[in-house]
Amino acid sequence: MTQTTFATLGLAEDLQRALVAHKFSIPTPIQEQAIPALLAKRDLLGLAQTGSGKTAAFSLPLMQHLSAENVRSMAFGTRALILAPTRELALQIDEAIRTFGSQSRLRTVVIIGGASRFKQVEAMRRGADIVIGTPGRVCDLMQTRELNLSNVRQFVLDEADRMLDLGFIRDIRKIVAVLPAQRQSALFSATMPSEVATLANGLLRDPVRVEIERVEATAPKIDQTVYHLAISGKLPLLGRLLEDSALSRVIVFTRTKHGANKVCETLETAGHRANALHGNKSQPQREKALDQFRSGRARVLVATDIAARGIDVTGVTHVINYDVPVEPESYVHRIGRTARAGAAGHAITFCDGSERGTLRAIERLIGGPIPVAEGSGPPQPQTAPIDPRQNRNRGPKPNQGAKPAQGQRRPYVQRGVRSAA
Ligand code: AMP
């Protein structure tokens, strides 16, 4: 069987060169399936999550279509709109498009809250082929007529399930209402609760449906452990764990913004380079925190779930759940921040007495118990590490054993392309 390459998918040579330059040699499953469908101008429903390569899957065909139109960037002549649930994700998409499109003349503008509205409008005045934004600010500028979407031919709604979680549905409906009917649309979502299905039905025309689950060969190997302890023991334990230099790039998740600040301050007092990332931080503060973490200047990032959504930082060695996440699904999302790109990763969870019920719900969701750290808390019936590859012939796979809760992320397994109609 011949290996699929970006060339065989039908991508233009300038994009292929940019991909080679950035060491993207083999398309990921979502890219393999979505790129030909999008190049053929079909609408697309993509079930895939961050880490699957979905950004390139939608942005490469989008750039190819826009470049083929061969028109000059004009003031307010926006031809493509990409909506993302968080500012960080919007900035990451922008960065990816600039990277792949370095040979093209396409101009991007990011329209997000927490950043200068004036500068965004000015940038659009200079010409914005592609607008990447969060629904709130996009809707805002659209209503003041500072953003004209009447020329949009390409529309992408990324992380639709997160959009709905964050309460963006009304803004999305307002935006979609002004988009021209003659357009190509793609919707990506990690999960497909009924609200997302309804949104997709209203948005997409005879879409190709691509569903990607975690392929066993690339399933992250995450070594998971839980410590049972009193709430008062959490800060001291965190300090002790950080004495180990193997924890070189660490995300600590807390349930609340206040908790994130407290943990961060304590770590700084103890001499650790740490930054907090949560909803009360300004955009420049968030960007600084992420920059320092990415570059290794700060070893620890203390984040809340929402602030950390869509963040893609490679080389995270450890995720520490300082608080057990209230939503079991968040556990999977949190620990997926480590063990990126085939690297090994570690996830450590601190569980106090009041959190045991939630921990059990997480274990039901992932299909097995999380091994208890030596000498910590109540014994568990089974303490084998959870690794999808080990359970291959032993009934249901982890993440599939329990009946999936609504909104549960499924592991990546290629499901093939089919029309959703
Ligand atoms: P995404 O799911 O779009 O956030 O992508 C996850 C990560 O995978 C990003 O860091 C991308 O740069 C990287 N990536 C995406 N596609 C490929 C590919 N075909 N080869 C290598 N890395 C990739």
Image (cartoon, rainbow, N blue to C red):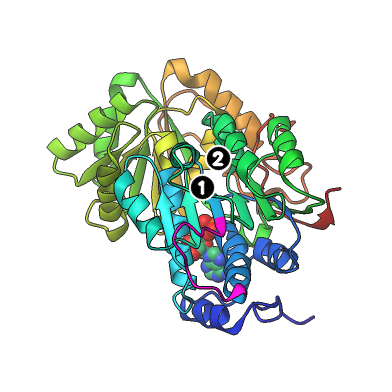
Residue at (69%, 31%) from the top-left corner? 195
The residue lying at 39 percent from left, 34 percent from top is 304
Tag 1 and tag 2, C-beta contact below 8 Å: yes
Q: Residue furthest top?
A: 354
Residue 86 place in picture, x, y as percent: 45, 42
For residue 16, the mark is none
Q: Is mark 2 within 8 Å of ligand 1?
A: no
Query: What are the residue bounds of the magenta stretch?
Result: 69-80
Q: Which label number is shown at residue 336?
A: 1
Q: Which secondary structure, mark 1?
A: loop
> What residue do we see at 41% from left, 53% from top?
110
- How far, Cα to Cα, is label 1 from label 2? 6 Å
Q: In the image, what residue type sits under mark 1?
A: Gly
Would residue 408 be counted in the magenta stretch? no
Q: Residues within 10 Å of mark 2 (few under 14, many from 20)?
A: some
Q: Which residue is identified by label 2?
A: 332
Q: Is residue 318 left or right of residue 342?
A: left
